[in-house]
Image: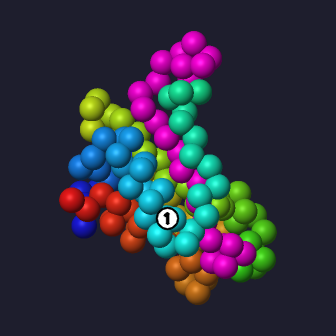
Amino acid sequence: MAEVVAADEAGIVTRLSPRTVTETVARLTGMLDAKGATVFAVIDQAEQARQAGLELPETVLVIFGNPAAGTPVMAAHPLAALDLPLKILVWDDAGQAKVSYYAAATMAMRHNLDSGLEHRLAIAPIADALVAP
């Protein structure tokens, strides 16, 4: 498992990527496609900042999910839709690409989900594979 880096906000997991932001995003979207997940959006926030005349280090938000996994969560707890689809942030921190996401346990606690639903929110296995050498 890749190194977990401390985060400023509780419940967020941040891991170091051995690749650039661009390479990490490409790897992530390829992995999600191969797993049959839907990639709903890839938002290049740095590009959006540039278009507004502002500067931001490389920052890309990937929004993805699988309706078969997420729908039962939202049916049981409609406000979980605030956290779904799932999101992974790939960002540059002084030349080091990082991968950040909300831990499944954090989302489960926020929405009072039981373990049977919490496992449907598991991002860690995807992140582990994403940052593997």
Q: Residue furthest left?
A: 133
Residue 11 visible in rendering: no
> What residue is rendered at 62% in x and 49% in y?
41
> What residue is rendered at 53% in x and 27% in y?
47
Rendering quarter of residue 93: top left
Residue stretch rendered in magenta on the structure:
49-71
> What residue is rendered at 37% in x and 41% in y?
21
Dot 1 amino acid type: Leu
Residue 64 visible in rendering: yes
Q: Specify the quadrant that holds the C terminus.
A: bottom left
Q: Specify the quadrant that holds the N terminus.
A: bottom left
- Number of residues whose C-alpha sits closer than 10 Å to that of mark 1, classed few (under 14), some (14–19) or many (20 or more): some
Residue 86 x %, y %: 58, 60
Residue 125 x %, y %: 39, 71
Residue 65 x %, y %: 60, 65
Rendering quarter of residue 36: bottom right
Q: Which residue is mark 1?
A: 32
Within the magenta stretch, is there residue 21?
no
